[in-house]
Amino acid sequence: MKTFIFYFSIVALVAMVLILATLPLRIKKLTKKMGTCLLPLSRKKSMLFVAVLCFAPLMIIFQWFREFQPYIHIILSATAVLAIEIVIREQVYDARSGVYENALIVDGRLLLKEDIIALPTLEYENDPEAFDESEDGTPSLSDPAYKKALKIVTDKSGVIFVGFESEEERNKTVEIIKNWV
């Protein structure tokens, strides 16, 4: 059983290396798919990427020194590999946040032009009654946080909310993508 666990751990570490090795290909494919950048958006710097890249392999290596049931080893190894996949994807998307010819990348999400169905926020944001204080004490639409967010209906992901760094950045984005709908 220890041999199985050791080999499974080696497979997980190799999978992590392969995920990292495909990073340039992912960037190239994504760049080709998106087209040229029409509006770059604020890009976040996160140390989470470095932390996960350091601790995910250690999570697998530390299993060699501890006895667990085989299914626990499999779950821990799969979790570490998925963590690497998630932070790589988020790093790629965050570094390229913006409005492109064929896509919108914001909040670590890639929204293709053809997937965006509607922008329901635009229907009620200019309605003066929508900005009145609600009776139950919940925040109204005049709250500054709502002015930096956008509700988007997509074909694949359903209804999602995305946030922007500023109201100006949101408005510039809306001006571009409202022609897509």
Image: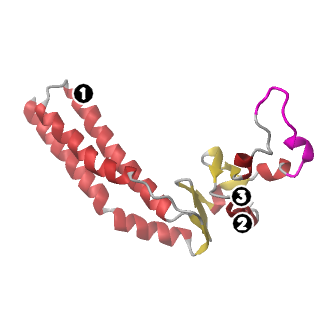
Helix, strand or loop under label 3: helix
Residue beneath disc 2: 172
Helix, strand or loop under label 1: helix
Q: Is residue 60 above or below residue 27?
A: above
**Amino acid identity at mark 3:** Glu
**Amino acid identity at mark 2:** Lys
Q: Nearer the viewer, mark 3 or mark 1?
A: 3
Q: Dividing the picture into quarters, in which one does residue 60 lie?
A: top left
Image mark for residue 71? 1
Tell me if 155 is positioned left or right of 4 in this view.
Answer: right
Q: Which residues are magenta?
A: 126-138
Residue beneath disc 3: 167
Decide whether residue 137 is among the magenta residues. yes
Tell me if 162 is positioned left or right of 47 in this view.
Answer: right
Which sits earlier in the primary sequence, circle 1 or circle 2?
1
Q: Tell whether label 1 touches label 3 (CB within 8 Å).
A: no
Q: Tell whether label 2 touches label 1 (CB within 8 Å).
A: no
Q: CA distance from mark 1 to mark 2?
A: 50 Å
Which sits earlier in the primary sequence, circle 3 or circle 1?
1
Graded by Cα atoms within 10 Å as few (under 14), some (14 to 19) or many (20 or more), the crowding at tag 2 reads few
Tell me if 142 is positioned left or right of 87 in this view.
Answer: right
User: Where residue 131 sits: x, y (%)?
Assistant: 85, 43
Residue at the outermost top position? 69
User: Where residue 85 sits: x, y (%)?
Assistant: 37, 50
Q: Dividing the picture into quarters, in which one does residue 111 lie?
A: bottom right
